[in-house]
Amino acid sequence: MNKNIRFMLLLPFALTACSQAVETLETIREKCHMAMFGTAENDVVKTMTFVIRYPGHDYLVETILQRPNRFANLTPGTSVVVDGDTAFIRKKTDTTETTKTELIPAAEMADFVAEPTFYYPAFFDHDSHFRGEIEYEGKTFYLIEVLLTHHVWVEYFINMETFLPDTILAHVKNRGKDQVWGRQIVSYQEVEGWSVPLKFKYFFGNREKLYLAEVQRFVSNTQIEEGVFAKPQDAQEDP
């Protein structure tokens, strides 16, 4: 075959290959932020509040994330609060509404470092590594890994079409044992112009035992009462 003719036949395939974008960590970060929050500007997200119904509970859990490093899970009886490198638990001790506050020992902080990463991708705020395309449960995703404090590392499986997080795996050391916590987003819903996980499946350690939770209400960038994160001066470490 004439070399010129062969070149002309191969040219459309070459142009198609060249026109496909080669994704990098930065482009995926930007596209993911656009997909979730409608803008590439990282400082648009200040607070996120989720009201969530979990299976087996007759009450709702209010989850608050305040960037850069505050997080709280509030329930009628027990609340978990994270403020930077400090975490504590508030427990109601009787019907008089008095509370007991216990500090979380540093050796047990991994759980509390991992929890916020399910709500706001850690790769927006922390050094990350792009691992390319990877097969997971029969689908191909972009994989981003983030190494955090207390030996926590998190894997984000990003949908290659929507650029929304699909599955999040947090690797933690819990009471001396290596565990994997997982969350798979079942559906997103647009709320206040943001794409918010409406339903998600999750597991703690046992991947075969999945639970389904549903977000009942979501609000963004609201003023959070300072008392939510206030640590009493007499807080003691749990013996």
Image (cartoon, rainbow, N blue to C red):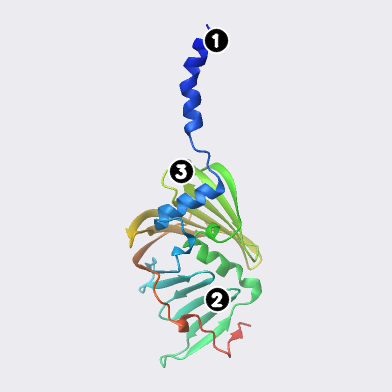
Element class at badge 1: helix
Is disc 3 placed on a helix, strand or loop?
loop
Looking at the image, tell me whether mark 3 or mark 1 is earlier in sequence order. Answer: 1
Check disc 1 and report the residue beneath it.
3
Q: Closer to the camera, 103 or 12?
A: 12
In this view, 53 is above or below 4: below
- Which residue carries the number 3 mark? 160
Q: Residue at x 55, y 79 (%)?
A: 88
Asked if disc 1 and disc 2 are in contact, CB closer than 8 Å, the reply is no
Give the quarter of the figure containing the C terminus: bottom right
Say which of 185 and 222 sits in front: 222
| Image coordinates for residue 169, horizontal then vertical, percent | 53, 55
Give the CA distance from mark 3 to mark 1.
37 Å
Q: Earlier in the sequence, mark 2 or mark 3?
A: 2
Instruction: Classify 10 Å Cα crowding around label 2: few (below 14), some (14-19), many (20 and above).
Output: some
Residue drawn at the location 45% of the way across and 48% of the way down = 163
Q: Nearer the viewer, mark 1 or mark 2?
A: 1
Labelled disc at residue 83 = 2
Q: Position of residue 69 (x, y in %)?
A: 54, 70
Give the answer, above or below, for where 146 lies relative to 23.
below
Residue farthest along the bottom direction in this orientation: 96
Q: For label 3, count other residues whose C-alpha is less than 10 Å away and answer few (under 14), some (14-19) or many (20+).
A: some
Identity of the amino acid at label 2? Asp
Query: In terms of depth relative to the viewer, which is nearer, 75 or 124?
Result: 124
The reply to whether dot 3 and dot 1 touch (C-beta < 8 Å) is no
Residue 104 as seen in the image, left or right of residue 120? right
